[in-house]
Image (cartoon, rainbow, N blue to C red):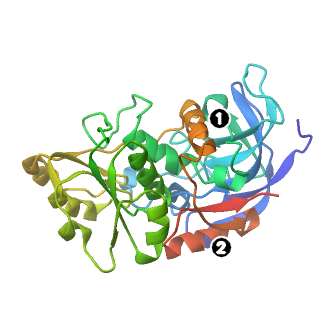
Amino acid sequence: MTTKTTMKAVRLHGFGGPEVLRYEDAPVPRLQAGEVLVRVRAVGLNPPDWYLREGYKSLPPEWRPKGAFPLIPGTDVSGVVDAVAPDVSGFAPGDEVYSMVRFPSGVFEGSKAYAEYVSVPANELARKPTAIDHVHAAAAPMSLLTAWQFLIDLGHDEQNPLQPHQHVPVPLQGRTVLVNGAAGGVGHFAVQLAKWKGARVIAVASGRHEALLRELGADEFIDYAKTNADEAVRDIDLVVDSIGGPATGRFLRTIKRGGALFPIFPLGFDAIEEARNRGVTVSATQVRSNGAQLAQLSRLLDDGTIRVVVDSTFALADARTAHERAARGHIQGKIVLTVD
């Protein structure tokens, strides 16, 4: 186990823009029962990182975090086991691992991934895929678990507070699935998983992503800058809107009766009555940390069934620049921080 008592980390001392991300010294986490200390090699960026940085402005005021500063943001890590708590079995120092750390349980306190070391509940940890490096492994957890839990296996029975019913994935074999925002983090995994399960996949993204998305399995491609997908297609079985938000209701007209709309970001959807009248199920879930599912996914990443696309990499010290890159949008895959 490391003898270091301090490490480098990126912390928030207040909410705001990318400029509030500070690269500074912080205490090395102390292991608690059931935890594993991981020496971080790479950190994947996700939208909740900037939602937290901004103070979750899109949530109703009573839901927003109050901020027990300083906070270390970030959830997705790939690294090497440094130490394990006495009650932990299945992992040992030197093991290469990856995880989505404490999500959503740590969403308002910071899940603490933007750091040289992070403590991880053992049940949220899995062996890193051997066929890919730490950068690509760190890019996978949240986005890939989101696509998996929406499309393949929910993996938990926690109630989504935003809807009265539990989310249930729908059959994909032989169905037509449209993925909006197909080149982004969740989107590029959704394309691959739907294709793996036997769906015909229509990918919607900007034109520069067409070649990549066809490589990943898309049967058809729509450049949203030239064509409005909601006007161009009909009789879709499932729309996975990886962008979501208030505009996701426009896809209801594309879906056949008995079909489904899965907005990855469901806040703002208000076309409930229209969906009911059209016979369309609208459903979402909150992605949750799950080491057992990451172990399953590790095998699919190892055998090449699923490919991780990395948009760009930045050093941990340059987290602010990475967040500025994210804010410009048009991301192809994932942004990753590297940790020396």
Q: Which residue is mark 2?
A: 321
Residue depth check, mark 2 versus mark 1: number of the one nearer the observer: 1
Q: Is residue 112 visible?
A: no
Name the residue located 59 percent from the left edge and 68 percent from the top edge: 323
Image coordinates for residue 333, horizontal then vertical, percent: 54, 62
Q: Which residue is mark 1?
A: 125
Name the residue located 76 percent from the left edge and 32 percent from the top edge: 31
Please give left or right for residue 28 compared with residue 224 in the image.
right
Could you tell me how far apart the alpha carbons at marks 2 and 1 are, in whole angstroms?
A: 28 Å
The quadrant of the image that shows the C terminus is bottom right
Image coordinates for residue 187, horizontal then vertical, percent: 43, 57
Helix, strand or loop under label 1: strand
Name the residue located 45 percent from the left edge and 64 percent from the top edge: 213
Q: Identify the residue at the far bottom of this view.
A: 226
Q: Is residue 150 visible?
A: yes
The quadrant of the image that shows the N terminus is top right
Q: Amino acid at mark 2?
A: Thr
Image coordinates for residue 93, horizontal then vertical, percent: 83, 33
Q: Residues within 10 Å of mark 1 (few under 14, many from 20)?
A: many
Disc nearer the start of the sequence (2/1): 1
